[in-house]
Amino acid sequence: MENSSGNMLKKERHAFIIKQINLHNKVLSADLSVQLQVSEDTIRRDLNNLAETGKIEKVHGGALSKSFHFPYQLNEVYAQDKKKEIARKAVGLLGEGMVILTGGGTTMIEIARMIPDTLEATFFTISPLVALELSERRMLTVILIGGELSKNAHINMGAKTVSDLAEIKVDLCFLGANGIDLREGITDSDWEVVQIKKAMIRSSRRLAIMSLGEKLGSVQKMKVCDLDMLEYLITDLKENNPAISSYKEYVKII
């Protein structure tokens, strides 16, 4: 009986870990240890087990979602239908001649795939993968912001990226949210990513944050910006969903 109970606890931990990785793309062993109230050694064993079965990508200090890891496998993208709904709404913000700045990630890939071939606009991006997808649209001008390529996040980062971002001013910036909360605002778990996101926000006249509805109310350790910096919050939820009603006084919900 004891062994069976232990296995059940392990299964529950694994389910929790996979859920967190799918939601936030990356998890840190130290954070999981606190959340699950087990030792970091236990978490490391759990991550090793999940990596061996091909469910996650283990990295130094934590793990990444398989859907976040290049090359993307269509059947491994978490909540893909919901991300397509976010992308559909986001494309509605695009207009002729606009200058857009984007981050990376699977939702941004979905946006790039939905942009009409007839749209003439300029896209700056820190993501080589997004740049390649955007380049398929014949009327777009696509400019990849340089820097050191993060092997985990697959975006360009570092001092050169921040410096190049300071040289531009765009109409609209699309960013994903690792954590989003009424009081804590937009948060992330990676210090370098936070610096890049802040630089992107400074370069933008308007900011659109994209987030799965199930991320609302989640908080990471590091602050990106307050909600009043946002022009738009784009989620997969319907406009009358109670989960987003309290956000409406801070930001336009799409």
Image (spheres, rainbow, N blue to C red):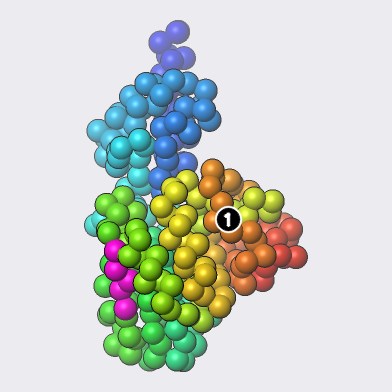
Viewer can see residue 154: yes
Nearer-the-camera pick, 249 or 213: 249
* Residue 14 colored in magenta in the image: no
**Residue stretch in magenta:** 143-147
Viewer can see residue 125: no
Q: Which residue is mark 1?
A: 186
Say which residue appears at 51% left-offset and 75% top-offset.
204
Q: Looking at the picture, does residue 72 appear above or below residue 251?
A: above
* Residue 145 colored in magenta in the image: yes
- Percent from the top left, x then y, of residue 118? 38, 91
- Percent from the top left, x then y, of residue 233? 60, 66
- Percent from the top left, x then y, of residue 20? 47, 41
Q: Quadrant of residue 244?
A: bottom right
Q: Looking at the picture, does residue 41 appear above or below residue 19?
A: above
Say which residue appears at 26% left-offset and 72% top-offset.
132
- Percent from the top left, x then y, of residue 172? 51, 77
